[in-house]
C-alpha cells in the first residue's frame, strides 16, 4: 500500500523523536519515498544524519540554509501524505493557528495531501483544554489524529499522551491508503463529554479512635474501571475508600473517603451531574451504633458491639436515576450467585450488574485477575478469567454501547 508513496515525515522536539527513526525505517521498508523535515528542537533529540541515512535523502531543518531555499510549497505539492510524528504541543498550536515559523508548519500550510499527526505529550499537557481545543481545530481542518497511547511517560507519570507506536502509525497510513477511510482515526472518544462517578475500595467504620470494622477490598477493580472510563474520554470522579492504591490518570479526580457515610455523601453530591455511576466499592452494611471517643479498654468480660445499618449508596442513586443515566453495580456472591445478583439488579435499579464469585480461582479481592458475568435484564454473559484492567475495559465498552446519547 505504501509502495511508491511520497511521504513527508515532520519530526518535532519530543523525546518520542527517537521512535521516528524506526518509523522512517518501516516506511522505507514498505517501499515509500520519505522526505524528513525537522524542527530545530527535534535535532536536539535525534540527529538529522541518522534520519538522512535511514531515509536516503537529505533532511531539511529550515526553510533555507543560508545559501539555498528549501521550497516548502513544492514539498507540500510533492507529497501523497504528510505525517507529523511526534507532534509536540508547540507545533500543534502552530498548526492550529497557522504560525508558520518553521519548515514543518510552512509545508503543512502548503500541503494539499492528507495530513496525519501523532501527538506526544505528558498527560497533563495532553489533557489541557488548550491542547484539546487545538486538536479539535486540526480535526475540523480535515487532518487525521493518530490516537495517543497510555502508559509510562518520559516524566515518570503514567497516563495518556504517548506517541502511537511506529507499527500502529504505519497501519493507520496503510488503512487510509487502502480504503480511503479514516473514520476510525478521527472518531471522537466514545465517552467524550460524559461524566462518571466510580465508588471503589472498602469502607472503614470506626469502633473507637484506633479500631474499625472493614473488609478485604483492595480497590483494584474500581480503580481500573475509573481509568478505563477516562481512557474512553469520560471525566471521572473516583470515590475511593481506604486503599493503599491510587491513580495518576488525567481525567480521574480522586476523592478519598473513610466511611460508608462519607462515600454516600460524595456519591449523592455528584450523581446529579453524572451520566454514569459504577458502584465497585465493598461498602460496609453495618457500623457501630456509637463510636467511643477513647480507646476501649479490655475487661474480664465478653464484648458486644451494637451495630446499625449504613445507607445503601447504590440503591439511593438507583431511586433517583434519570433516563440519561446508567448505573452499573457489582455483586460478590458465595452461593445462589445468579439469583442473588439478579435480585440486586432489580432492587437497586441497575442497568447491569457485574457478578464475581469468590468460588472462582484468581477472582475477587487482592488478585490482579477477575472472572465475571455481566447480567442485564435480558442477558447473562459469562467471561473467562481476565486481568482486572481487561474486565474494566469490557465494562467501559458496555457502558459506551448502552449510554443514551
Ligand atoms: N452497595 C452500595 N452501598 C451499600 C452496599 C452496597 O453502594 N451500602 C453497592 C455495591 O457497591 C455493589 C452493590 O451495591 O455495587 C451490591 O453490593 P453487595 O455488597 O453485593 O450487596 P448488598 O446489597 O450489600 O447485599 P448483601 O451484602 O446482603 O449480599
Image (tube, rainbow, N blue to C red):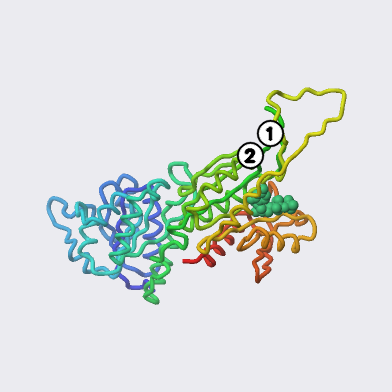
Q: Position of residue 242 (x, y in %)?
A: 62, 39
Respond yes or no on whether mark 1 lies under 8 Å from ligand 1: no
Q: In which quarter of the image is residue 70?
A: bottom left
Which quadrant of the rendered structure holds the N terminus?
bottom left
Residue at 68% from the left image edge and 44% from the top image edge: 310
Residue underneath mark 1: 206
User: Does residue 363 sit above or below 290 in this rendering?
Assistant: below
Residue 283 marker: none
Give left or right: position of 114 versus 330: left
Q: Quadrant of residue 293?
A: top right
* Residue 175 seen from this side: yes
First reached walking from the N terminus: tag 1 or tag 2: 1
Residue 259 marker: 2
Q: Position of residue 396 (x, y in %)?
A: 55, 60
Q: Quadrant of residue 372?
A: bottom right
Q: Do the residues labelled 1 and 2 touch (CB within 8 Å)?
A: yes
Residue at 77% from the left image edge and 36% from the top image edge: 306
Q: Where is residue 268 in the image (x, y as percent from the top left)?
A: 55, 48
* Residue extending furthest toward the bottom: 179
Relative to the observer, which residue lies in front, 168 or 358? 358
Residue at 26% from the left image edge and 68% from the top image edge: 79
Q: Where is residue 66 in the image (x, y as percent from the top left)?
A: 13, 50
Give left or right: position of 368 versus 323: right
Query: SS class of the residue under badge 2?
Result: loop
* Classed neighbour count for the residue bearing mark 2: other residues with Cα under 10 Å, few (<14), some (14–19), many (≥20): many
CA separation in Å, label 1 and label 2:
8 Å
Amino acid at each position: 500500500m505504501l509502495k511508491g508513496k511520497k511521504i513527508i515525515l515532520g519530526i518535532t522536539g519530543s523525546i518520542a523523536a527517537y521512535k521516528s527513526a524506526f518509523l522512517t525505517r518501516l516506511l522505507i521498508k514498505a517501499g515509500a519515498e520519505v522526505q524528513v523535515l525537522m524542527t530545530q528542537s527535534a535535532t536536539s533529540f535525534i540527529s538529522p544524519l541518522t534520519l538522512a541515512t535511514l531515509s536516503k535523502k537529505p533532511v531539511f531543518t529550515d526553510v533555507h540554509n543560508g545559501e539555498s531555499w528549501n521550497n516548502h510549497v513544492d514539498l507540500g505539492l510533492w507529497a501523497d501524505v504528510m505525517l507529523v510524528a511526534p507532534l509536540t504541543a508547540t507545533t500543534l498550536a502552530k498548526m492550529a493557528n497557522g504560525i508558520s515559523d518553521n519548515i514543518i508548519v510552512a509545508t503543512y500550510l502548503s500541503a494539499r495531501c492528507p495530513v496525519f499527526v501523532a501527538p506526544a505529550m505528558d498527560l497533563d499537557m495532553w489533557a489541557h483544554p488548550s491542547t484539546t481545543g487545538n486538536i479539535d481545530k486540526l480535526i475540523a481542518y480535515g487532518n487525521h489524529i493518530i490516537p495517543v497511547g497510555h502508559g509510562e511517560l518520559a516524566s515518570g507519570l503514567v497516563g495518556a499522551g504517548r506517541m502511537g507506536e511506529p507499527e500502529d502509525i504505519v497501519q493507520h497510513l496503510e488503512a487510509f491508503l487502502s480504503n480511503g477511510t479514516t473514520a476510525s482515526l478521527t472518531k471522537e472518544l466514545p465517552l467524550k463529554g460524559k461524566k462518571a462517578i466510580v465508588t471503589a475500595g472498602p469502607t472503614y467504620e470506626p469502633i473507637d479512635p484506633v479500631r474499625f470494622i472493614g473488609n478485604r477490598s483492595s480497590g483494584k477493580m474500581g480503580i481500573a474501571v475509573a481509568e478505563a472510563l477516562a481512557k474512553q474520554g469520560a471525566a471521572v470522579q473516583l470515590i475511593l475508600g481506604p486503599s493503599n492504591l491510587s491513580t495518576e490518570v488525567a481525567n480521574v479526580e480522586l476523592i478519598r473517603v473513610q466511611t460508608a457515610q462519607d462515600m454516600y455523601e460524595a456519591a449523592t453530591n455528584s450523581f446529579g451531574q453524572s451520566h454514569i455511576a459504577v458502584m465497585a466499592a465493598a461498602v460496609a452494611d453495618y457500623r457501630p451504633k456509637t463510636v467511643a471517643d477513647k480507646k476501649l479498654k479490655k475487661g474480664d468480660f465478653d464484648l458486644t458491639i451494637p451495630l446499625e445499618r449504613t445507607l445503601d449508596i447504590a440503591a439511593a442513586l438507583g431511586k433517583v436515576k434519570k433516563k440519561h443515566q446508567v448505573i452499573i453495580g457489582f455483586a460478590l456472591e458465595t452461593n445462589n450467585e445468579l439469583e442473588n445478583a439478579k435480585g440486586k439488579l432489580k432492587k437497586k435499579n441497575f442497568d447491569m450488574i457485574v457478578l464475581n464469585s469468590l468460588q472462582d480461582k484468581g477472582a475477587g479481592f487482592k488478585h490482579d485477575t477477575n472472572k465475571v458475568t455481566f447480567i442485564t435484564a435480558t442477558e447473562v454473559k459469562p467471561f473467562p478469567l481476565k486481568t482486572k484492567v481487561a474486565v474494566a475495559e469490557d465494562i467501559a465498552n458496555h457502558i459506551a454501547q448502552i449510554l443514551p446519547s
